[in-house]
Image (tube, coloured by chain):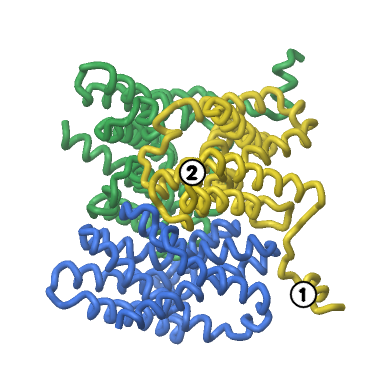
Chain colours: A green, B yellow, C blue
Amino acid sequence: MRVLQEILNDLGIAVFAASGALLGVRKDFDLWGIVTVGVLTGVGGGILRDLLLGITPPTSVQNWPPIIVAAVASLAIFFFHPTFTQLRRSVLILDAIGMGLFASSGAAVAIDQHVSAFAATLVGLLTAVGGGILRDVLANEIPLLLQPADLYAVPALLGAGVVAVGGTLSSVPIWVWLIIGTAVATGLRVAGLAFGWRLPTAGPGWRRRDAGT
Amino acid sequence: MRVLQEILNDLGIAVFAASGALLGVRKDFDLWGIVTVGVLTGVGGGILRDLLLGITPPTSVQNWPPIIVAAVASLAIFFFHPTFTQLRRSVLILDAIGMGLFASSGAAVAIDQHVSAFAATLVGLLTAVGGGILRDVLANEIPLLLQPADLYAVPALLGAGVVAVGGTLSSVPIWVWLIIGTAVATGLRVAGLAFGWRLPTAGPGWRRRDAGT
Amino acid sequence: MRVLQEILNDLGIAVFAASGALLGVRKDFDLWGIVTVGVLTGVGGGILRDLLLGITPPTSVQNWPPIIVAAVASLAIFFFHPTFTQLRRSVLILDAIGMGLFASSGAAVAIDQHVSAFAATLVGLLTAVGGGILRDVLANEIPLLLQPADLYAVPALLGAGVVAVGGTLSSVPIWVWLIIGTAVATGLRVAGLAFGWRLPTAGPGWRRRDAGT
């Protein structure tokens, strides 16, 4: 169980790092820039989580495996990126799994620090989306997360919330909630992709439709 | 007194959140993006304050009221934003009050943590302007705060400084300094708006005027 | 020794602040904006270092000298910037010294907090490059550090690594490692500038050359 979680977590870091490195390639960064954006995308959510929880130095700064995993994934993109752009669908699925795992495990780490269920939910959400926000801010783009697109943050919020509420209020072991939370977040994300679910914008078009015309 | 301060603080959060949500509407973010930018603008200054002071998890992550207030204000903008754009003057006044309150209360929170008067001044300033900086960085714009415009940060710095110096060096109760600091910051901001006070830029135009031509 | 280190450190802060203030001048910020970007560029790396290490409030927030040094340097740029643009080569050398000092001293501060050698290396790197990243994000530009250019982060990483590994594994006094680390980082940076060393990008041009055509 524990080993499986570690493997899935490293896979999540690798996929996140790859998304950062790919953006670095598209922006014509050099080797250093590509690996830096990749690493920060892969471990940035966990670092922000630890800063909010007062865990210093952050786990992935103190121990080398997460950053090495992220760096290797970024180097793979640097050398073989034309191959990866053809794997878009597989990458989306892996990213959905990574997001679900980060949201759930982030909330669980927060519960370990005895924060409120409200705080654990927010920390889980930030763990899942923080790396992507760092990636986009560093690449000087508006975070994807804020723009009209397939559901991403809402599944993360719900998955983290399941772990946070279940883990603080029930006596069911936390690993049960981790599985449920990851399934909820990843499942909703994949369903949203499959069915094209989107949130409304406040633009004039939507306002008009909303007014019944 | 205490209740009035809470109400004014929530009003400040709501006004800041509304400014973030309005920028989200203008940038065509979706419902999630608008609420996220609104919430981060409303509580971002307080979160940065707590991170600098080592208060983890930050107060507005641990307790739900500030984020709920910010989210409700953002939703109000989402649904009724055409109304709000006509209230520009009222919003500017409310924003000036919010800024003054955040600068003063930020400095007071810092004093509670036994930091230097210098640190309390900086922390008060960051509490007042941090949310707006986060808002602009996330929306991929140069922070308004850095651009030539009506005085904003200088009044916040002076208001925070009054609370920081008064609160650490005198025996006058802190609530007296909170009132004076807020009045200084908000008053200077409103006066600056009324009289069009601006700081110089380093551009050639200003250099020439400075040289007496 | 100690006094010399303080002087060199203040010189590093001043040069970093000047680079931030110059960008503020080019972006037509006003007096406040120029000093703010200057100060954040000068002390931002140290603040990020302290946040990662749990030192709150950060040293340069608690004590006024670093920010005053950075503010004075920024004001000098505000008033005399046409002079400074002609000193480009001297500024590059001073910046290389500041970078080397920040990378080494950042790693040493981290060792004092009993973190791993891996963490001390990363913290030293962040101390050296964090201010410049803050500067570019606030000015709404892609961080210079990520773009194809002369070596900057790699020398910082190696200098910080020398101090981190030497300071944790050997019994040689830390000031010896500080000198070696600074010499490594600054020396590599200057050599990179002199010989035009660059890292590859992942662009099609480089791929083709790499493939031997």
- Whether C17 is drawn above or below A102: the answer is below
**Residue C104 locus on image (x, y percent):** 32, 72
- Whether C136 is drawn above or below C159: the answer is above
Residue at image coords 47%, 27%: A154
Left or right: residue A62 versus residue C49 is left
Image-quadrant location for residue B71: top right
- Whether C111 is drawn above or below B192: the answer is below
**Residue C63 locus on image (x, y percent):** 42, 63
- CA gap, disc 1 to disc 2? 39 Å
Seen as rendered, the residue at the extreme left is C171
Out of B172 and C88, give the one closest to the viewer. Answer: B172
Q: Which residue is mark 1?
A: B207
Left or right: residue B199 versus residue C121 is right
Q: Hey, what amino acid is under mark 1?
A: Arg
Dot 1: chain letter:
B
Secondary element under disc 2, as helix, strand or loop, is: helix
Q: Which residue is mark 2?
A: B108
Residue at image coords 56%, 36%: B42
Image label count: 2
Image-quadrant location for residue A149: top right
**Residue B33 locus on image (x, y percent):** 57, 34
Residue at image coords 43%, 39%: A129
Is the residue at mark 1 from the same chain as the one at mark 2?
A: yes
Q: Quadrant of the N terminus of chain B?
A: top right
**Residue B171 locus on image (x, y percent):** 47, 47
Of the numbered discs 1 and 2, the one sitting upstream in the chain is: 2
Dot 2: chain letter:
B
Q: Quadrant of the C terminus of chain B?
A: bottom right
Q: Is residue A18 visible?
A: no
Seen as rendered, the residue at the extreme top is A212
Residue at image coords 82%, 73%: B209
Q: Hey, what amino acid is under mark 2?
A: Ala
